[in-house]
Image (tube, rainbow, N blue to C red):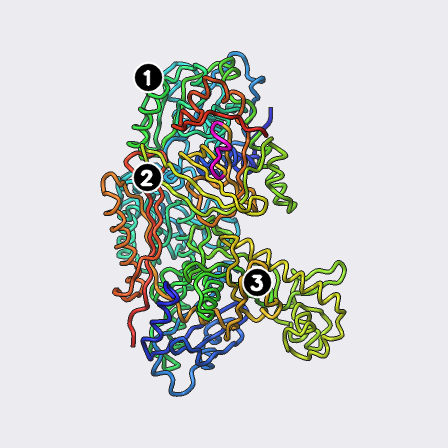
Amino acid sequence: MSGAVARAARLTEDTDAMRVGVDVGGTNTDAVLMAGHRVVRKTKTATTPDVTSGIVRALEGVLAEGRKSGIQAVMLGTTHFTNALLEGRGLARTAVFRLCGPSTRLLPPFCDWPDGLRAAVGGHDYLLPGGHEFDGREISAFDNAALRDAAREALTKGVEAVALCGVFSPVNPAHESQAADLLRQEWPELSVTLSSEIGRIGLLERENAAALNAALSRIADRAVEAIRTALADLGLAVPVFFSQNDGTLMDAAYAARYPVLAMSSGPTNSMRGAAFLAGIENAVVVDVGGTSTDVGILVQGFPRAASTAVKLAEVRTNFRMPDLISIALGGGSIMRRDPPAVGPSSVGARITEEAIVFGGETVTATDLAVAAGRAEIGDPARARSLDCELVERGLAEVQRRVEEAVDRVKLTADPLPLVLVGGGSVLLADRLAGASEVLRPEHAEVANAIGAAIAQVGGEVEKVYSLEQVGRLDALAAAKQEAVARAVEAGAQPDSVEVVEVEEVPLTYLPGNATRIRVKAVGELGGRA
Amino acid sequence: MWQIDEDALESISIGAGILGTGGGGNPYIGMLRARELVRANGPVNVLGLEELPDDSRVICVGGMGAPTVGIEKVRGTESYRAVRAIEKHTGERATSLISGEIGGSNSLEPVIPASLARLPVVDGDGMGRAFPELQMTTFFIYGIPPTPTAVCDEKGNTAIVEDAVSPTWVERMARAVTIVMGCAPVFAFAPMSAADVRRTAIPGTLSLAKSLGDAVRRAQREKQDPIEAILATVPGRVLFQGKIVDVERRTTEGFARGRVTIDGMDGDAGAQLVVDFQNENLVAHRDSDVIVTVPDLICIVDAERGEPITTELLRYGFRVSVLGFPAPPLLKTPEALAVVGPQAFGYEAAYVPLEP
């Protein structure tokens, strides 16, 4: 074994310390206590409206008396922030200050947002002096007075959070930093997000991400504080880390500043957990839940990132995020007879009342699996009354749709190992087209919490270099060094950090060998007990 | 005559992305920019070549520079200033605008000055696709004088190329100015007469881009195969279907040159397609045979959604369909092939026209 999974395994073998992984989903909050790569305890509880009390209950479920002393850290993955955006709940009143000078003014901030969300966050925008060219030259000079005027006006409109976005700030963040310093000094009550710290090149997508982050700033502060308090109340004096969208970790202070980076961590964690449980680095992961199934692909132990623009709450962003296919198919999916079809509607959390095996009247995908003898759930005798042909056709349909999704995510035609996780994985047979083998690891139902527990910390950098001026090797070295520094800033142990990804894109039409270099570095979580 | 409204912009941006053969600028940004103006000033009229009044003065506009800069330092209304600069320099007024290339965001660049000056745009362009350099427009290939040419940035700077010994020299000088200006300026060429445009432009390409986009969107909506929908709109064929297994890029002489290797799937299983590109896709080899070259169009689209994938976005693992379309007749004459044929790009292979 090599790469990320092996490093995670070595880390846990190296130490007696234990980790707790928690995944807060829309329906369930799962927790696992892990020692080495052994799952010591696991629990599944209902997610509570306040989120925190569900986390406390899940933690109590895995922390037997006397165990608290050996805990190294608590790692958390959550969809809490996504739900807040989708529901427009608790968002900060947000302004975007774009540092652009005369450039980019035709497409102002929020120009491609849905009206509802724009209204929910306030949607104030200011076009200010500043910004840089692709090579780091200034488009126009930074202007303190203009920034102050904008801030004063924004404050009169009730703005609580500001997203700063400078043109080419990933190349030269100086103006964003100057603006942030000034705002934080003169108006410490304002929450300030710098686009250069969260996004890559692509002005609107990076600015959108920064604005989403600013809008989430109040909730993130509160959530992180509440979780810290909850841990203190439980007597757990350990650091808390949050999972990012790409499966690496950030510390709690970082998460409070950059909640948008955690928005898609749930599915990522189940994929990483699946990789860990199956001891595999390159595989297809199928996570079958109650209403939907996520299919993704692991490359070197990490979920493959999406290539096209990713929408968060209908807002275009350019995050590194897992490339997942979601299909409306799960254990609670309803089987219709005429014409025979499974899903997309599902009984969801009501499965324990409505499914045939639980004494209900609705034929669900789970009933089909029980009737076929693939699982012992509820009262299997009740499932035996189901028409054999219906069972066969339903399960064949489930199989076909999952196989189709598997085929769509795969990189090559060669069969790959397939890891099945999630409570609904009993729906599927042990042979699937495109899979060299089907693995059903133990503890698969809490793969997401395990993924959180074994996550690592990463740092990423993306910049444009003129290779005629810098030289390719120097440019690569500078980019790598900065990626490593960012991983360390995010909580990695300096001596464990490795560069895992290097991408070079020459800028078309330009002489001078202008090249965009993207580097990602990953390391083990520091601060061992 | 027809009109470009918000809905037409959506379609044109998809269609122009396909016709761009990998280049032409980010289609989404191009659509957003034109949409701002159409929302403010209403739809823009489109005139067919035959509808141009005989006393027309048609100015060609487009963006220059790097697509990667264009998605960050997003262009504004500079092309309106470029048009005004040419008018001031020549003492003539534009009566309509035309696109230099129908590929990518450049297909919609004329909509910006057209909207601000309340002028129509012409249903045609100077490439029928996208090419990397200014001398590759049919206007210059067929003898329209390439000067004066204006280059404008977003700061208010304008450069005029007053005289040039050839269209290639316009490209060289404009390219140097482009870099100084921060790599996202726009250009405007000297006004052309109706007769010039009718003789040299590729006709009907805005309509074609719209029809292509309409077809893709309809197929997506109705869960039909978008690739079939594309081929039902433009005569052409599927050259290859597969997954990208390698993308090799290098920067030479200010261009992104490289090749993408695609392993066949389905009917093409066992075969390999290699596409060479210089910003735009140039030549496709199936195993060791050259099967399509410039000026014919080689378009890489997402196999599922039928949406175009530009050359700098090509990445390992994408599942794609590679489509081939015959070039418009104006790109296949001996004088055109001397500028845009395979040998103009350094290939030994002679041009063998693609049969649809």
- Which element type, helix, strand or loop, lies under badge 3? strand
Relative horizontal placement of residue B113, taking residue A9 as reference (left or right): right
Relative horizontal placement of residue B296, taking residue A497 as reference (left or right): right
Comparing B352 with B202, the one in front is B352
Comparing B230 with B34, the one in front is B230
Q: Are marks 2 and 1 on the same chain?
A: no
Residue carrying label 1: B164
Residue carrying label 2: A101
Residue B143 in percent (x, y) is at: 43, 14
Mark yes or no: residue A385 visible: yes
Q: Amino acid at mark 3?
A: Thr
Q: Are marks 3 and 2 on the same chain?
A: yes
Residue at 29% from the left image edge and 49% from the top image edge: A173
Residue A219 in percent (x, y) is at: 43, 64
Q: Are marks 2 and 1 in contact (CB under 8 Å)?
A: no
Residue carrying label 3: A293
